[in-house]
């Protein structure tokens, strides 16, 4: 080794160390950037989950508040003074209304009562056969879907029309219980009475939009082809709920190649 080469050793060491330092800084910056990106993604996921939990909590809280008010009103009605017996709910839901006063009676009133009773029964049947084993909020969700369909121009404009749409066919009915023989089985009296109560509450305006405007639902153990064409809105009990995509969602959907 010459004297010149020996004198260059410190310079080479310095350059080598500088390269190592630069490489270390680059690796550190890459790791930091990757960590920041991962953290941002994790934060977004956490916020999305928190928003969903908060939304579900609001629905449950609203339902609890509604049931508390309903219970308080029923309790007050039971213990409060009354000058004469009030009308029973069966008086309004009977298939053959009792006409006690022919002087003040109008012929169209009987049709109104019978129509109300028929609609009530159809809604109660949908609740019973579709969600009798579900919690109260799950039963209200089925009623909500039926009533959402009644409001839609796509479906019949009556509850019975919606519930029994396609029932004349062996396949293709909108609610499977109307064409698969389920209605031939004996009713469970307790669950049927509960379904009637939920239906009466929904028809009297005591309903919550728990499904977020859903018009479709299916059990969580099946995966129907049409579910991919709709927008998910809620999961309640054993049912997944959907609504029809709006114009903006349809425009944003990827084009099939």
Image (tube, rainbow, N blue to C red):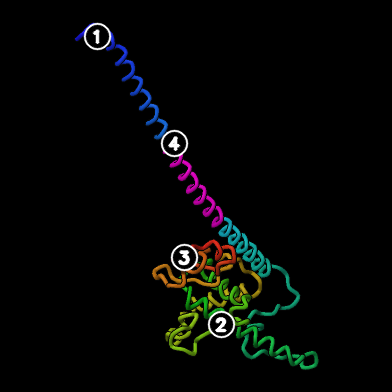
Q: Specify the segment rendered in magenta.
A: 33-57
Residue 39 screen position, x and y as percent:
45, 41
The residue lying furthest to the left in this view is: 1
Q: How far is mark 2 from mark 1, CA to CA?
A: 100 Å
Q: Is residue 78 left or right of residue 180?
A: right
- Please tell me how crowded label 4 is: few (under 14), some (14-19), or many (20+) other residues with Cα within 10 Å: few
Closest to the observer: 151 or 191? 151
Labels 3 and 1: the sequence-earlier one: 1
User: In the rendering, which numbered label is found on residue 237?
Assistant: 3
Asked if the residues shown at circle 3 and circle 4 are in contact, with their CB atoms under 8 angstroms apart, the answer is: no
Q: Quadrant of residue 115?
A: bottom right
Residue 185 can be seen in this image: no
Q: Looking at the image, which residue is at 58% across and 84% down? A: 161
Regarding mark 2 in the picture, which secondary structure is present there? Answer: helix
User: In the rendering, which numbered label is found on residue 6?
Assistant: 1
Q: How far is mark 3 from mark 1, CA to CA?
A: 81 Å
Labels 1 and 4: the sequence-earlier one: 1
Labels 2 and 3: the sequence-earlier one: 2
Residue linked to disc 2: 122
Regarding mark 1 in the picture, which secondary structure is present there? Answer: helix
- Please tell me how crowded label 3 is: few (under 14), some (14-19), or many (20+) other residues with Cα within 10 Å: some
Labels 2 and 1: the sequence-earlier one: 1
């Amino acid at each position: 080794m010459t004297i010149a080469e020996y004198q260059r050793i410190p310079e080479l060491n310095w350059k080598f160390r500088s390269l190592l330092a630069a490489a270390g800084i680059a690796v550190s910056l890459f790791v930091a950037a990757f960590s920041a990106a991962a953290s941002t993604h994790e934060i977004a996921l956490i916020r999305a989950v928190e928003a969903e939990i908060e939304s579900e909590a609001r629905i449950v809280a609203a339902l609890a508040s509604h049931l508390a008010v309903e219970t308080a009103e029923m309790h007050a009605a039971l213990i409060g003074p009354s000058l004469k017996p009030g009308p029973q709910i069966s008086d309004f839901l009977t298939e053959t209304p009792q006409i006690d006063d022919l002087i003040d009676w109008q012929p169209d009133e009987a049709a109104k009562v019978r129509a109300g009773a028929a609609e009530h029964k159809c809604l109660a049947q949908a609740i019973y056969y579709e969600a009798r084993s579900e919690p109260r909020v799950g039963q209200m969700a089925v009623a909500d879907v039926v009533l959402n369909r009644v409001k839609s121009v796509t479906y019949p404009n009556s509850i019975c029309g919606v519930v029994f749409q396609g029932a004349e066919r062996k396949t293709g009915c909108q609610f499977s219980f109307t064409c698969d023989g389920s209605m031939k089985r004996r009713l469970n009296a307790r669950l049927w009475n509960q379904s009637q109560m939920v239906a009466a509450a929904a028809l009297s305006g005591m309903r919550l939009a728990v499904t977020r405007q859903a018009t479709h639902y299916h059990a969580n153990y099946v995966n129907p082809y049409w579910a991919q064409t709709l927008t998910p809105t809620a999961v309640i009990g054993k049912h997944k709920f959907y609504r029809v995509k709006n114009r903006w969602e349809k425009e944003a959907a990827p084009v099939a190649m």
